[in-house]
Image: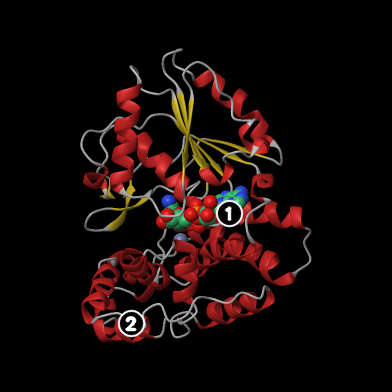
Amino acid sequence: MISRVVFGRGSFSQLHDVLQPKRLNVRAPFIYIVDDVFKGNAWVTSRIPLSYDDEILYISADEEPKTSQVDALVEQIILKYKEKPSGIIGIGGGTILDLAKAVAIMLTNPGSAKDYQGWDLVKNPAVYHVGVPTISGTGAEVSRTTVLTGPDKKLGINSDYTPFDQVLLDPELTKDVPKQQWFYTGMDCYIHCIESLTGTYLNAFSQSYGEKAFELCKEIFLDNKLSEKESQDKLMMASWHGGMSIAYSQVGVAHAMSYGLGYLLGTKHGVGNCIVFDHLEEFYPEGVTMFKDMKKAHNIELPQGLCKNLSDKEFNTMIDVSLGMAPLWENAIGKNWEKTITREKLRALYEKM
Ligand code: NAD
Ligand code: ZN
């Protein structure tokens, strides 16, 4: 669980007050990892409090985080400063939040980030880290994982040291998210709800968060009665609840297959989930029908024909990545998932995308 949370429109202006008591000493800087979409955006950057050796690192979110990128950032920070940073602050979407979490962990743990992809492999507590989401949906602000692409797998660092020590939720920061991206990342949250609520791992804890997030998603993407501000506020909370829901259950088929697309083709998480989910009627009949209604309501056209010209080898790579996500399949289908989820089945589904 995240131990400290601030919520409110405009609360980003309180970042200074939040961080000040956490400064270890004047030589231990706060390092801000900021989505480069905000470079030159004074409305955001003028409120990032900088003193002593504090630094902003602008990072592109065009590609999702890699273990090599985490290692390079950590090395850069260690070489530049004599002391460990007072804190790492991620300001951006899922890509940037995951990078911030991974850098905070790797500043206190030896080796490469790839050594920690998996479950509970992290030994030492991370550097104090803070998450400030600027787009809503992934739940990365609340989750116990940081999803990284490594040399041989795309897998999260799942550990008790991964979650942020502090999250600052200011829905106003999401006001300039482009419409398509708003939909794709928002649908990540909707898909978290469907996969959690229909999964075999479901329990009362996950269900209570999942139902709330699902209700909010319906209000935001279907009912069409909210003002823009209400919609921003509610999507930020939907993302939070969706993330809490999967924290104690698991995601399912859309995520398992979307990881395959992401690994082979670099397809980003939000849009990849949408492309896959659009073809999953047999697994999630009601959820997919509602998804199609949401797409229609917002005039969203999904990319088509991603797998049209792939070779057998490439299909097999995607299938291997996808089948490697055993807990996701077990959650979706049950303990005997391997009986029905065959390579041929996945190939046929990928061929439709
Ligand atoms: P993202 O962070 O890649 O951002 C999407 C796009 O929106 C980028 O171009 C970014 O620059 C832009 N953007 C962000 N905020 C903006 C703003 N306020 N105004 C204008 N543009 C803005 O996308 P995402 O969907 O939030 O995150 C995807 C990543 O999250 C993937 O790497 C995925 O693996 C990860 N993820 C992590 C978890 C987790 O629990 N850790 C869960 C789901 C997804
Ligand atoms: Zn997701």
Closer to the camera in the image, 212 or 189: 189
Residue 307's quadrant in the figure?
bottom left
Mark 2 → mark 1, Cα distance in angstroms: 33 Å
Residue 261 visible in this rendered orientation of the protein? yes
Residue at 46 percent across and 82 percent down: it is 279
Residue 46's quadrant in the figure?
top right
Query: Measured from the top left, where is residue 217 in percent x and y?
Result: 63, 64
Three-letter code for the amino acid on which mark 2 is drawn: Asn
**Residue 308 shown left or right of residue 205 in the figure:** left
Image mark for residue 303: none
231 vs 132: above or below? below
Residue 68's quadrant in the figure?
top left
Three-letter code for the amino acid on which mark 1 is drawn: Ser
Query: Measured from the top left, where is residue 306 in percent x and y?
Result: 40, 77
Q: Secondary structure at mark 2?
A: loop
Residue at 40 percent across and 24 percent down: it is 85
- Few, some or many residues within 10 Å of mark 2 (<14, 14–19, 20+): few
Which residue, given by chain and number where applicable, does mark 1 sit on? 136
Residue at 46 percent across and 38 percent down: it is 164
Query: Measured from the top left, where is residue 293 in percent x and y?
Result: 64, 79
Residue situated furthest top in the rendering: 26
Residue at 58 percent across and 54 percent down: it is 136
Question: Is the residue indicated by label 1 positioned so its CB lies within 8 Å of ligand 1?
Answer: yes
Please state which of the two labelled residues, at mark 2 or mark 1, is closer to the viewer: 2
Closer to the camera in the image, 18 or 315: 315
Which residue, given by chain and number where applicable, does mark 2 sit on? 309
